[in-house]
C-alpha cells in the first residue's frame, strides 16, 4: 500500500518519480535463451527512466553474482551528488520461471521502494549492453522503469546505438530517459 501511495504521489509530482502511465504494462518479449552466467558481473548505468531511488545519484553501478541457493545477488552502488558519499544496497533476484527466461523478481531486504519488482532483460549481448525493463500495474497506473547498462563505464557510440535499436524495436519512448552521470567516478 505504501508503495502504491509513494508511486502515485511522486508520479503526480512529475519528474521525481518513476515514469507513471495510465495504462497496462506492455507485454514485451524478453531476450531468448538467457544465459545467466554470462550476464553476471559488473554493469554501468548509461540511461534510465527517472526514479526515486536514484535521485541525486551518479556513478551508478550494478554487480550481479550467484548466491549459493541459485538466486542472484544484486549489488547496486551510487555516489550521492551532494555529499560525494557512496551508497550501496544489496538485493536478491529470483527467476520467475525457467532460468533461461530473462525474468526475475528483485527484492531489497533493507527496504526501499523497488521491492518485489520485476526485472526483465529485454535484450543483452552479455559483452557490451543490457536493456532492462520493469513495469508494475497499480490500480489505474503502471509504473515503468527502464535501465540501459553497459559493460564499459562510458559506452561507445556503437553500444549506445545497439541499445537504442532495442528501444525502437519495442517502441519504448526514449524522450523519457535521462542519461547517467559517470564522470569523475573512481
Ligand atoms: C538465497 O540466498 C540469499 C543470499 O544469502 C538470500 O538473501 C535469499 O533470501 C535466499 N533465498 C531463498 C529463497 O532462500
Ligand atoms: C568516462 O568519461 C568521463 C567523462 O568524460 C571521465 O571522467 C571518465 O574517466 C571516463 N571513464 C573511463 C573509464 O574512461
Image: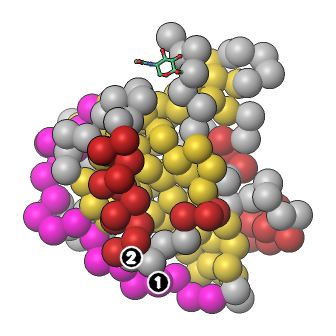
Tell me the chief SS of the magenta region: loop
**Which residue is more in the foreground, 144 or 176?**
176
Provide residue 5's location: percent of width, then percent of height: 80, 68
Figure quadrant of residue 41 = top left
**Which residue is more in the foreground, 50 or 137?**
50
Figure quadrant of residue 126 = top left
Mark 1 lies within 8 Å of ligand 1 (Cβ measured): no
How far apart are the alpha carbons under marks 1 and 2?
Answer: 9 Å
Which residue position holds label 2? 170
On screen, residue 73 versus residue 127, left or right, reads: right
Q: Is residue 133 visible?
A: yes
**Residue 38 vertical position relative to residue 16 in the rendered view, above or below:** above
Query: Is label 1 in a helix, a strand or a loop?
Result: loop
Q: Of discs 1 and 2, which sits in the foreground?
A: 2
On screen, residue 91 versus residue 161, left or right, reads: right
Please name the residue shown 53% across and 32% down the image: 60
Pointer 2 local density, CA inside 10 Å: few below 14, some 14–19, many at least 20: some
Residue numbers of the magenta segment: 23-41
38 within the magenta span: yes
**Residue 90 vertical position relative to residue 99 in the rendered view, above or below:** above
Which residue position holds label 1? 26
| Quadrant (top left, top right, bottom left, bottom right) of the N terminus | bottom right
28 within the magenta span: yes
Amino acid at each position: 500500500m505504501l508503495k502504491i501511495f509513494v508511486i502515485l504521489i511522486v508520479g503526480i509530482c512529475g519528474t521525481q518519480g518513476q515514469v507513471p502511465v495510465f495504462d497496462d504494462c506492455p507485454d514485451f518479449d524478453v531476450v531468448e535463451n538467457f544465459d545467466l552466467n554470462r550476464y553476471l558481473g559488473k554493469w554501468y548505468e548509461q540511461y534510465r527512466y527517472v526514479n526515486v531511488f536514484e535521485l541525486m545519484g551518479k556513478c551508478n553501478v550494478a554487480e550481479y553474482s550467484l548466491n549459493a541457493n541459485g538466486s542472484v545477488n544484486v549489488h547496486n552502488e551510487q555516489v550521492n551528488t551532494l555529499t560525494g558519499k557512496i551508497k550501496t544496497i544489496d538485493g536478491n533476484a529470483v527467476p520467475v520461471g525457467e532460468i533461461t527466461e530473462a525474468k526475475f523478481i528483485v527484492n531489497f531486504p533493507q527496504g526501499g521502494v523497488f521491492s518485489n519488482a520485476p526485472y526483465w532483460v529485454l535484450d543483452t549481448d552479455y559483452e557490451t549492453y543490457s536493456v532492462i525493463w520493469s513495469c508494475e500495474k497499480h490500480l489505474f497506473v503502471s509504473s515503468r522503469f527502464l535501465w540501459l547498462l553497459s559493460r564499459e563505464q562510458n559506452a561507445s557510440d556503437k553500444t549506445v546505438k545497439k541499445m537504442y535499436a532495442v528501444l525502437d524495436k519495442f517502441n519504448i519512448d526514449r524522450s523519457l530517459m535521462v542519461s547517467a552521470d559517470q564522470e569523475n567516478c573512481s
